Structures are given as C-alpha cells and as structure tokens.
Amino acid sequence: MQRKAAAEARSNRRSTLLAVGRTLFERQGFRSVSIAQIAAEAGLSSGTFYNYFDSKEAFYDCLLDQIESEGMRTAEQIVLRLRSPMNKLRAVYHFITLGLRRNPILRGVLLHKPEYLYPGMNQRLQRSEGLRRYMERMVADIIGEGTRKGVFRTSLYNNPTALVTAVFDAIIIHIEDDDVDELLADLSVFLQRGLRRALRLRRRDERIDRRTVGEPDEWI
C-alpha cells in the first residue's frame, strides 16, 4: 500500500513538473525558462527536479514527446471516425492547421524559432517516430486507400504523398502570415480538386462521414 502511494506521488510530481514546464515554455520559449523556475512554479525544489530529469534538455525532450504523442493519438482518433479517404485527408489538414495555431511549442519547433530550439533538435526532427514522420505515413496510407477505392487520381503525379506532404509543409511555413486564412482556403481547394478523380456529387462515404461527425464545417 505504501509503495503504491509512493509511486502515485512520484508520478504526480512528474506530471506536475511537465504541466508547469509546458505552460512556461509556451509563454517564454526554451531558452528563457530555468530549472529553478520550473521547480518553484511546481512547488518543488530544484533537487527534486533532478530526481526525474537529468537536465533541462532532457525535460524539454520529454515534454515534446508528450506533445507529439497527444497529436498522434488525436489525429488517429479523427481519421478512424471517417470512411471517405478525401475526408480523412481533409481531417489531417484541419488537424494540422488547428494544432499549429493552438500549440506555441510545436509551432516554434517546426518553424525553427531559436527560442524554442535546443542542442540536438535537428536529430530529433529526423527521428522516424516523430509527429511529422507519423503524419507522412498517415498521408501515404490515406492516399493508398483513396487510390484503391478509385477516389484519387494519383496516376497524374510522380509522388502524390510527397506532393501532399509539401502542401502541409507550406502550411507550417506560412501559419503566422497575415494572409494565412486565404492560403489555407486555397490549399484546401487544391487538395480536393487536384486529387479527386472527378468533381461530382458527394460520394456515399462522405455523406456518412458528415452525419457521423455531425459538423457543418467545410473541411468535411
């Protein structure tokens, strides 16, 4: 019983440190936040911090793992609700745009803002299990499904997965531009008309998706 209570207390302290650190990093970036500041905001000592993390870099890396895992779970949950490959692609697009706007840390890392980077970040971004690589694989799976179902006309392109991924990269690069809403609208149209085999009335899967999700938003 005591061991269980001690384990829970340890887990709670670790979770508190991560939650506090996330808030501080969102506001100030990586460089401006100190270990002492994180520990103090969490109501703990700096020594306690080192019981859980070896360094600020290790702490930040763990926090980024948490953020990316949340993103992967959310993206998968969204896509699994849908039947239409086109709607799945729209959903990924919608997820990326909202996620970047709502998550300053993720946006800062993907835009390579100096205040959100740390030594070793380049190696992290190249990891095969990261969020961006995960999204690439998800896009490839969706395009493959759409091609098999006759929804996408991928034969027009040498590498449709790379093309769509480049579109998503354009979103990342321009997400903070003043006219980004116009760009997002144009890219959405481009994705739909550039991949769909023919412009026609909504396919059955797309009609079912709209009823399942129950949202009138244009992304679906």
Image (cartoon, helix red, strand yellow):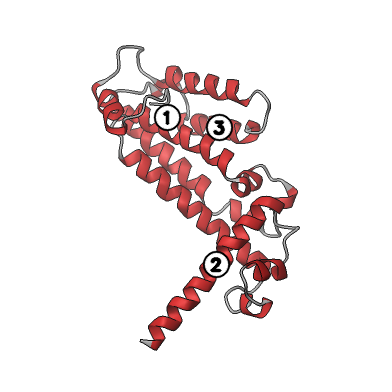
Along the viewing direction, whichever of 30 and 134 lies nearer the viewer:
30
The amino acid type, in three-letter code, at marker 3 is Ala
Q: CA distance from mark 3 to mark 2?
A: 37 Å
Q: Tell me what residue is drawn at x 29 percent, y 29 percent.
A: 209
Asked if residue 107 lies left or right of residue 130, the reply is right
Mark 3 packing: few (<14 Cα in 10 Å), some, or many (20+)? few
Q: Is residue 42 visible?
A: yes
Q: Tell me what residue is drawn at x 43 percent, y 43 percent.
A: 137
Q: Nearer the viewer, mark 1 or mark 3?
A: 1
Residue found at the far top of this picture: 200
Residue 94 rendering spot, x and y as whole percentages: 47, 33
The amino acid type, in three-letter code, at marker 1 is Arg
Q: From what the image shows, is residue 198 above or below residue 18?
A: above
Q: In the rendering, which numbered label is found on residue 166?
A: 3
Give the labeled residue for mark 1.
Answer: 90
Q: CA distance from mark 1 to mark 3?
A: 15 Å
Q: Earlier in the sequence, mark 1 or mark 3?
A: 1
Q: Tell me what residue is drawn at x 71 percent, y 67 percent.
A: 37
Residue 16 rendering spot, x and y as whole percentages: 54, 67
Residue 171 rendering spot, x and y as whole percentages: 58, 32
Give the labeled residue for mark 2.
Answer: 16
Mark 1 packing: few (<14 Cα in 10 Å), some, or many (20+)? some
Q: From what the image shows, is residue 204 above or below residue 37?
A: above
Q: Toward which corner of the image does residue 21 lie, by quadrant?
A: bottom right
Residue 129 rendering spot, x and y as whole percentages: 48, 54
Asked if residue 36 lies left or right of residue 75, the reply is right
